[in-house]
Image (tube, rainbow, N blue to C red):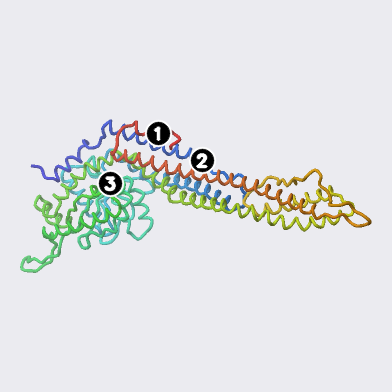
Amino acid sequence: MKTSEQRFIDIIGSSGNSGNSGGAEADVATLLAALRDWLASLDAALTTGRIEAGGLQPGSALAQRIAALHQALAQQHQQREAQWLALAPARALAQRFEGKLMVLVFGKFNAGKSSLCNFLAERFRQHGQAVQYFHLQGGQLLASDEAFHEGATETTARLQGVCLGDGLVLLDTPGLHSATDDNAALTQRFLDSADAVLWLTSSTSPGQVQELDELARELRRGKPLLPVVTRSDVIDEDEVDGQIVKCLRNKSDANRADQEADVGHRAADKLHALGVAAAQLKPAVSVSAYVARSTGADAEAMTGAGFERLYAALLELLAPALAYRARKPAEVLLHHLQEEVEAPLLNQTMPALTALRQQVQEELDSLPARQARLVQQAWREVMPQLADLLEAHAGVADVAAVVAALNAALQQAATQHAQACLDSHILPAVGTALDLPADLGYDSAPTDGLPAAYEKLYETLGAAVQDSLQRMAGDLAERCAARLQALDQALQHKQQIILDGQRRLGQIASLLRGLHAGANQLREPAQEV
């Protein structure tokens, strides 16, 4: 009867797991097309739904915020293009190993990543399988004859990996907790290439689940996670040739079971908090590569060191990992769209649009008070001039001269105060024609050197000024309100474009997860994005 190790190596060593069915490839191709259509439709809708600041003064707060909105959208577009280019090494890595299962070996420094990878490589060699180490240098994957360096401190300064047989690639990356930012950035760049994750946690401090925060993005993408408790051994004393010597022995079954259960519970709670499906978490297993090596790595040693259980767990990991691999091209594009297109729109553009709409509403609410102030200030400026004009022309009772001068003063005052009270708007030429009766005249003609009386004329002209200002201010306020309401509708439309895009991308993501099926569900009218 074959051991779990032999069964696993036989499967990986053959090419039987490397292909996808034609149906699966067709489904992924359909989803890829749907994702590309989504982006093209969204871009077209956002461009068509451009917010115009026409009619607003360029220096006004509203116009500046609209300009800032368009600038932010342009920056988002540039950043997403740059991010897609930055993912090119990860995509190239995936293509370089197309058809192979890629497993990320994750853990903080000193978790035993290199040791485990080397030991698994040794086992594959002993079973007659090809083993090829490689590392990334200068953007190129270079083959290496040397195994990974194993040390007491972080030693992986570059992405490195090993191909096992024809079907498995282990990626040993610079730890996300390592000292240099370059290491962490390098790891993040290549996470997309992985189909499954082995989370290594040392038995000296097992289950440090805060490490999983670094994997939250990947785990939310549906990749299976297998916790592996490494260095599951203890220092013991033994007598050799009459001398007491210290040696490493496997931890007891009970101790291992307790640690595995604890790590499993901690990980389950953490994944729940991260919003990750519980089914992605596999039961933890404990191993000691050191004890397996030092005791000859025969069947008994392998079982005692936990590797038979590890291989059994890896066999269970194959199905979900292969399922992820089958949809990986669409997953990679989906993640890019979610993180570099959708997220900025929801987290940056939507709040900016909401703030703009609030500002537009405040501007609308302020229009009645601005209209009243315009009338009041222009009235206060014109009416003292009216008395002087009537007095100046009373000697000859020249009403036409009074009206002409009054019209000029009214036009000037109305224009000046309209621009001041409605300073956010580009205003049309102000019209202030006075509506006067045909028989308008002084109250009496000049007599015996006395000027004509004009009390009633003053009242008539004052009422005409008030009426003209009210009509003029009302017309301007109505124009401004219509402009603001159109602007608010445009802002609301852009918000709806983003929300429709979010809904549609969620539908495609659900289809990708296998929750729905059918290519006919991937198409909707273009206007719905």
User: Which of marks 3 and 2 precedes in the sequence?
Assistant: 2
What percent of the width, then of the height, locates residue 140?
36, 45
Residue type at mark 1 is Glu
> What residue would you read off at disc 1?
524
User: Circle 1: is it few (<14), some (14-19), or many (20+) Cα within 10 Å?
Assistant: few
Q: Which mark is residue 223?
A: 3
Residue type at mark 3 is Lys
Can residue 417 be seen here? yes
User: Which of marks 3 and 1 precedes in the sequence?
Assistant: 3
Q: Marks 2 and 3, how far apart in space?
A: 37 Å
Q: Is residue 207 left or right of residue 415?
A: left
Can residue 114 be seen here? no
Q: Nearer the viewer, residue 247 or 250?
A: 250
> What residue would you read off at disc 2?
49
Q: Are marks 2 and 3 in contact (CB under 8 Å)?
A: no
Q: Residue at x 62, y 46 (%)?
A: 478
| Disc 3 secondary structure class | loop
Q: Nearer the viewer, residue 415 or 37?
A: 415
| Disc 2 secondary structure class | loop
Q: Residue at x 11, y 52 (%)?
A: 303
